[in-house]
């Protein structure tokens, strides 16, 4: 995420209108607009793997996966989470939701601080949110915080299955990191090749 644009505070209506015609996504925090940085290929691979695994599973469910082009409204803030699951989407508002049950962010150097502070506190205080998931892209580490466990972090690594408790789905960590190029994944694949698996 880049720094806030240098100008007076922007109203929510003006922000929403500008987003409809902009070719870049921006997040909105209490009157300030923050232009978002582009995603890396590893970031995109993780998001696509989530979309494929969760999307297929939810095909016949009232819950639906939402990608990074749908905004999340939290009080006076609008964010673009990397991935969400929403089981009560309000069709009267086509460009944002206020009712996700799962929010997933893929961490990067430019977003980590915001994802682990401002967004964390905003997300876990939303009544609908049951799970907040933080996924590293440079190493293999998936952190899940659940309302049912008092928001205490649970970490998942290669060899584990990540439990998305609110939709009753488990996904192997290696599937979430499929095609991702980082040291942990390369070592895992080399070890598997040597064992002939």
Image: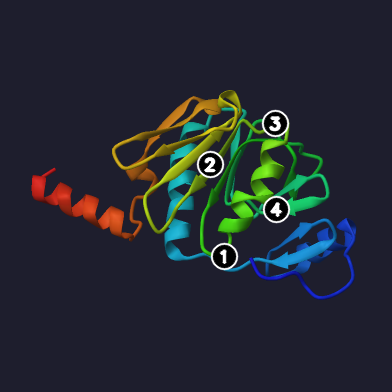
Residue named by callout 4: 79
Residue named by callout 2: 133
Residue 22 drawn at (x, y percent):
74, 69
State whether residue 158 appears in this view: yes
Left/right of residue 21 with respect to residue 84 in the rendered view: right
Sequence order check, earlier mark of 3 and 1? 1
145 or 66: nearer the viewer: 145
Residue named by callout 3: 128
Choose top left, top right, bottom left or bottom right for residue 171: top left
Q: Secondary structure at mark 2?
A: strand
Q: Are marks 3 and 2 in contact (CB under 8 Å)?
A: no
Q: Secondary structure at mark 4?
A: strand
Measure the C-alpha gap from mark 3 to mark 2: 15 Å
Q: Secondary structure at mark 3?
A: loop
Q: Secondary structure at mark 1?
A: loop
Query: At x 33% / y 60%, what residue is drawn?
Result: 182
178 or 122: nearer the viewer: 122
Disc nearest the viewer among 3 and 1: 1
Say few, some or many: other residues with alpha carbon within 10 Å of mark 3 (under 14 / 14 to 19 / 20 or more): some
Residue 145 drawn at (x, y percent):
55, 35
Measure the C-alpha gap from mark 2 to mark 4: 15 Å
Q: Which mark is residue 110?
A: 1
């Amino acid at each position: 995420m880049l720094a806030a644009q240098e100008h007076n505070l922007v109203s929510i209506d003006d922000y929403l209108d500008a987003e409809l015609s902009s070719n870049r996504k921006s997040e909105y925090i209490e009157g300030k607009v923050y232009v978002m940085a582009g995603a890396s290929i590893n970031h995109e691979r993780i998001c696509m793997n989530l979309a494929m695994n969760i999307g297929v599973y939810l095909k016949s469910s009232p819950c639906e996966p939402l990608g990074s082009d749908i905004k999340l409204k939290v009080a006076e803030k609008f964010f673009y989470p990397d991935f969400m699951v929403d089981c009560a989407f309000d069709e009267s508002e086509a460009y944002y939701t206020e009712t996700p049950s799962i929010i997933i962010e893929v961490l990067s150097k430019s977003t980590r601080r915001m994802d682990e502070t401002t967004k964390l506190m905003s997300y876990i205080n939303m009544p609908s949110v049951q799970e907040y998931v933080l996924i590293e892209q440079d190493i293999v580490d998936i952190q899940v915080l659940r309302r049912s466990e008092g928001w205490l972090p649970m970490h998942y690594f290669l060899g584990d299955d990540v439990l998305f408790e609110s939709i009753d789905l488990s996904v192997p960590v290696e599937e979430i990191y499929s095609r991702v190029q980082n040291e942990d994944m390369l070592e895992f694949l080399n070890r598997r090749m040597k064992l002939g698996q």
